[in-house]
Amino acid sequence: MKPKAGKIILYIILGLIAVLWIMPILFIFVLSVTSGESIAASGYTLFPKEISFDAYTYIIKNPAQILSSYKISIIVTALGTVLSLIATTGLAYTMSRKDFKLSKWFNKYVTFALLFHGGLIPTYIVVTQWLHLGNTLWVLIVTMLVSPWNVFLMRSFLSGIPTELREAAFVDGATEFQTYFRIVLPLAKSGIASVGLLVLFAYWNDWYQGMLYIDDMKLTPLPLLLYKIISNIQYVLQNSQYMNSANDFPTIGARMATCVIAIAPMLFAFPFFQKYLAKGLTLGSVKG
């Protein structure tokens, strides 16, 4: 039986949307390996006349620093995602429990944190002078540990779990922790995967916390290192007396190469979470 014309049209539309999503990534990669002379002569194109890896050579001229920053980003992202999920899920669970006396207070507190922020200077003083986390690996993790938006998103999943399941577990003699780990969390896998992916991207792409609190190059995460490289390129462009030839400098290619280096690991990680993200966001939108 041939597919209906409506399905064919739908497949064509979805195919075009997929191409539109892929094209920017492909365009970034092509520009990263296009020579500056080719860009100057032909403009931006998917079929460059001359291929050059000068941009990557410029960026990885200090491979030890690149590898060190990759290691820091991987450690921060992995450890931060796990700790953030533990904290976010635990807080969201207490907020979703209507029989918990402090649940309303926690909801108000997180709502206040979502709407208002302490400010940059007070936060900097607390982190550096009270907690003494400056120039440590923990400052990159603790400052982004809990997001009010992720807490509310996780709460919407946990609120959809029937209370009868918890009550039945209590009747069977299960403790609060056993109910939480053996019943609640397994039923919230889609929500955990969805929030986990958001947290994963946030930690991997963050450069701002490092710029504020990290001065040691050994603790510099990859996004911050790439930001510094881009800033150096911009400085050189604005002070052309430091260059022998402006045309020989891999300006556009270097910018695109930094994007490729930064997003490559996430491109490989995203397909594993994609189905959970789509399902989780859909379920979360109709619960709570």
Image: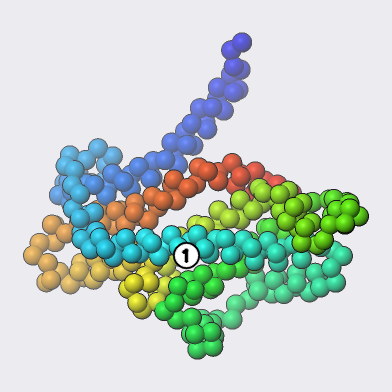
Q: Is residue 17 left or right of residue 113?
A: left
Mark 1 Cα-neighbour bin, 10 Å: few <14, some 14–19, many ≥20: many
Q: Is residue 251 among what the camera can see?
A: no
Q: Picture quarter containing residue 89?
A: bottom right
Residue type at the position of mark 1 = Val
| Point 19% across, 43% down: residue | 51
Residue furthest to the bottom in view is 129
In this picture, is 30 found above or below 86? above
Q: Picture quarter containing residue 108?
A: bottom right
Residue furthest to the right in view is 171
| Point 61% across, 50% down: residue | 193
**Observer-nearest residue: 5 or 211?**
211
Where is mark 1, residue-wise?
76
In this picture, is 226 found above or below 131? above
**Observer-nearest residue: 170 or 109?**
170
Q: Is residue 240 among what the camera can see?
A: yes
The quadrant of the image that shows the N terminus is: top right
| Point 84% across, 57% down: residue | 174
Residue 118, given in percent of the width and then of the height, sits at 59, 81
Residue 173, given in percent of the width and then of the height, sits at 87, 57
| Point 80% across, 62% down: residue | 176
Residue 207, given in percent of the width and then of the height, sits at 42, 67
Q: Is residue 194 left or right of residue 138?
A: right
**Observer-nearest residue: 208 or 245?**
208
